[in-house]
Image: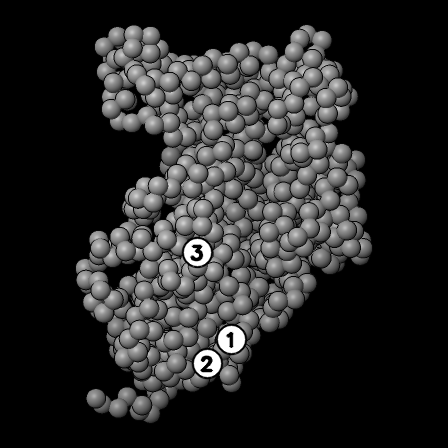
């Protein structure tokens, strides 16, 4: 082979677009390099220019350069930029190994599948096929998939794979105890079925590639020697498997350049290990650390606030963002009465920015959790302002909300066939295709609804056994819920319906990463229901909300969670809901302690640095939990932003919350964030008797505040006396009779 280490070409023009630290990162191509690239400092420019420089200097052929990132979009952008940079050099970069971790691993496995007992034509299963296969294994082991849902088991197995654990090494890993201690056996049989089918799932691509390298050292030696240069994007987001895979490949030339930002590591909940970037120097002795700190995105006040906030984290390598742009405006801090006022004020601000000729496309509302979008969606719809939800569905389009609304539709109108068909087997009731076919045939033959067809078949014996009993129970439940609706509030009746139907328990048992978010959305639906006195008015509202133009073109306000916002930037950003328990999330603090607090702070840092020119932070003084208002404390993160970067903006008459130097100490006394401790929520409100969890879901503890004989007050029924207790349901003797109510809807009399 011809020696490619020839004399370098003249200095390329693209160097003129680099600042000194960026150029240092591009030109330091020998040995391990960690580029700490702060938000908006041009990391993609560094990565792509570094690749172009390596190829232009003839330090390697394109096929000897490996560049990995996390998304196909990022990979496509990098390829386009590299080709553009090399356009006038005559170098063909099409041979680059540039793609996502999983696409590169799949490419290697295709070439060496036989070494692991697979054929090169193996298929990659999607999520539905994975669930179907796991269900077969659960059935084989006689494991109740209602108690241990296949989706939850799949989540545990993928956790094993993210940590590069084959079945024989997973016994001592967190999650091994799941499914009655049989999760490892399920994993083992699942992998065996995959292999028999010549199939892999997404997690296998990294796991089996590592297995290939460790069991076949000659294959590893080939690739480790082949890749003269390795470049990694978003290194702070790598999980254990990706980290091990990179370290194995880098043992050849050790020319590995990782670009990342430890201050933006926000995906710990899905396996990312911030420790990977923190111990880079330990993993690669003699590594050079280059910090990119000049920000080209935001104003000095935005950067000052972000830098001061993230400096509170202890687990970081450290850097301070700066800019040479003009001062710009301070961050606006709004203290509002409640979430409705918060939504109204943000709506008014958006209208004002529109009048000042700002594009809706340049505005974003970033929330900590998906359920928070509802009040903002409804406010923007009221104002006639178009919006898009990025990285998720609009509130009323989400599966769990559609299901709950379907239950409400059947409650209001039994003859709503579409709604009944959606929920008749949700949660699972053993209603199969043959039963549904019989119901449809009967309904068509008698020109009736499905609901009436069920009544007819039960009465005439057309349905028998377990199916008849199940459907009979469902009809009786709907009759009881309709009767309850006559004497109770809509929100209270729906709460009872979702509990007694088993729908809420279905998601509680799911144990997947998104299951808790679905439960949060259902709680947010409960809050929405409180605004409507009748079921008819609520369903009419939902119909109007859902009847919208599906055209996604044109200008729209961007709405998304903070996790979805990473990598994006907007001129105008609104960050609502900065309250203790909501942000930082109390659930994260309870589960992960100080580590969780630092990840929440990194998330706040990401949110702040999405803004280019205008940033508004807001927090509500109270939020409505079911039928009770609960006071809220402003987020501790607000106290960590220096006052010189903040401009408090409050409605007339609304007191400004004190952000004194002792604020953090006071908060820590109220809400301990050690994993073993329970937050002392009782000091906040008398009605909060158990753990304070985002999104502010207060639940009565086992030592109920409403013992037998106690006096309670209900918003609709007035004052009464507790005469019976069944879990969180109370039998209360009111003046107009005995009522069964949920304890969340009463307060001490």
The residue identified by callout 3 is: 159
Q: Is residue 676 left or right of residue 147?
A: right
Q: Is residue 505 left or right of residue 52?
A: right
| Residue 345 position (above or below residue 498) | below
* Count of numbered badges drawn on the protein: 3
| Residue 395 position (above or below residue 191) | above
Give the quarter of the figure containing the N terminus: bottom left
Q: Is residue 374 left or right of residue 388?
A: right
Q: Nearer the viewer, residue 434 or 637?
A: 434
| Residue 76 position (above or below residue 137) | below
Tell me if label 2 and label 3 are in contact, CB under 8 Å. no
- The residue under the point 52% across, 47% down is 561
Q: Nearer the viewer, residue 163 or 62?
A: 163
Mark in front: 2 vs 1: 1
Few, some or many residues within 10 Å of mark 1 (<14, 14–19, 20+): some
- The residue under the point 37% across, 84% down is 253
Q: Nearer the viewer, residue 147 or 12?
A: 147
Q: Nearer the viewer, residue 45 or 414?
A: 414
- The residue under the point 71% across, 36% down is 689
| Residue 514 position (above or below residue 80) | above
Residue 229: horizontal and vertical position, in percent?
Answer: 37, 79
The residue identified by callout 2 is: 32
Secondary structure at badge 2 equals loop
- The residue under the point 60% across, 55% down is 592
Mark closer to the chain start, 2 or 3: 2
The residue identified by callout 1 is: 280
Tell me if label 2 and label 1 are in contact, CB under 8 Å. yes
């Amino acid at each position: 082979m011809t020696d490619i280490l020839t004399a370098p070409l003249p200095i390329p023009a693209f160097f003129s677009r680099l600042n000194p630290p960026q150029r240092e990162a591009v030109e330091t191509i020998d040995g391990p390099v960690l580029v700490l690239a702060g938000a908006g400092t041009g990391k993609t420019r560094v990565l792509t220019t570094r690749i172009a420089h390596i190829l232009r200097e003839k330090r390697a052929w394109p096929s000897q350069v490996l560049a990995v990132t996390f998304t196909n979009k990022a990979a496509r952008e990098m390829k386009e930029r590299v080709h553009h940079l090399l356009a006038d050099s005559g170098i063909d970069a099409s041979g680059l190994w540039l793609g996502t971790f999983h696409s590169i691993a799949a490419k290697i496995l295709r070439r060496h599948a036989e070494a692991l007992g697979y054929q090169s034509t193996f298929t990659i299963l999607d999520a539905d096929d994975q669930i179907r296969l796991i269900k077969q294994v659960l059935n084989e082991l006689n494991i109740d998939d209602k108690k241990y849902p296949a989706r939850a088991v799949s989540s545990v197995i993928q956790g094993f794979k993210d940590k590069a654990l084959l079945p024989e090494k997973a016994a001592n890993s967190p999650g091994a105890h799941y499914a009655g201690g049989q999760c490892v056996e399920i994993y083992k049989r699942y992998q065996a079925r995959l292999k028999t089918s010549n199939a892999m799932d997404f997690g296998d691509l990294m796991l089996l590639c590592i297995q290939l390298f460790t069991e076949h050292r000659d294959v590893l030696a080939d690739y480790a020697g082949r890749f003269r240069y390795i470049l990694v994007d978003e290194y702070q987001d790598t999980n254990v498997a990706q980290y091990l895979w990179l370290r194995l490949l880098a043992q050849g030339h050790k020319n590995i350049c990782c670009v990342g930002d430890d201050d933006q590591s926000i995906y710990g909940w899905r396996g990312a290990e911030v420790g990977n970037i923190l111990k880079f120097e330990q993993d690669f002795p003699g590594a050079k650390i280059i910090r990119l700190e000049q920000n080209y995105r935001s104003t000095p006040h935005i950067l000052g606030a972000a830098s001061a906030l993230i400096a509170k984290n202890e687990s970081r390598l450290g850097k301070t963002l700066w800019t040479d742009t003009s001062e710009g405006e301070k961050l606006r801090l709004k203290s509002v009465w409640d979430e409705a006022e918060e939504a109204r004020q943000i709506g008014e601000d958006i209208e004002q920015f529109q009048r000042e000729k700002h594009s809706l496309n340049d505005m974003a509302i970033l929330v900590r959790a998906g359920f928070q979008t509802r009040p903002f969606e409804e406010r923007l719809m009221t104002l006639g302002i178009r919006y898009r939800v990025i990285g998720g569905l609009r509130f009323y389009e989400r599966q769990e909300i559609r299901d709950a609304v379907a239950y409400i539709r059947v409650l209001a109108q039994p003859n709503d066939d579409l709604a009944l068909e959606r929920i008749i087997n949700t949660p699972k009731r053993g209603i199969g295709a043959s039963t549904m076919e019989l119901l449809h045939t009967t309904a068509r033959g008698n020109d009736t609804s499905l609901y009436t067809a069920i009544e007819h078949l039960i009465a005439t014996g057309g349905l028998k056994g377990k199916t008849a009993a199940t459907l009979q129970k469902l009809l009786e439940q709907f009759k009881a819920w309709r009767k309850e609706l006559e004497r109770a509030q809509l929100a209270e009746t729906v709460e009872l319906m979702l509990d007694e139907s088993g729908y809420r328990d279905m998601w509680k048992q799911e144990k997947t990463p998104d299951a808790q978010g679905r439960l949060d959305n259902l709680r947010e639906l409960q809050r929405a229901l409180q605004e409507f006195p009748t079921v008819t008015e609520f369903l009419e509202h939902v119909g109007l909300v859902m009847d919208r133009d599906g055209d996604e073109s044109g200008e729209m306000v961007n709405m998304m969670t903070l996790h979805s916002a990473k990598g994006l930037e907007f001129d105008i950003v609104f960050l609502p809901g900065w309250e203790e328990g909501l942000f930082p999330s109390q659930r994260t603090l309870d589960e992960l302690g100080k580590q969780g607090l630092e990840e929440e702070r990194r998330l706040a840092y990401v949110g702040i640095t999405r803004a280019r020119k205008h940033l508004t932070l807001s927090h509500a003084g109270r939020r409505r939990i079911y039928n009770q208002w609960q006071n809220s404390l402003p987020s501790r993160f607000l106290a960590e932003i220096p006052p010189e970067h903040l401009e408090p903006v409050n409605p007339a008459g609304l007191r400004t919350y004190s952000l004194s130097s002792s604020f953090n100490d006071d908060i820590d006394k109220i809400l301990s964030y050690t994993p073993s401790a329970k937050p002392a929520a009782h000091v906040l409100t008398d009605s909060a008797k158990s753990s304070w969890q985002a999104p502010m879901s207060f639940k009565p503890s086992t030592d109920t505040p409403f013992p037998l004989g106690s006096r309670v007050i209900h918003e609709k029924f007035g004052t009464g006396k507790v005469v019976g207790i069944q879990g969180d349901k109370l039998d209360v003797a009111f003046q107009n009779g005995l009522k069964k109510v949920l304890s969340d809807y009463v307060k001490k009399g």
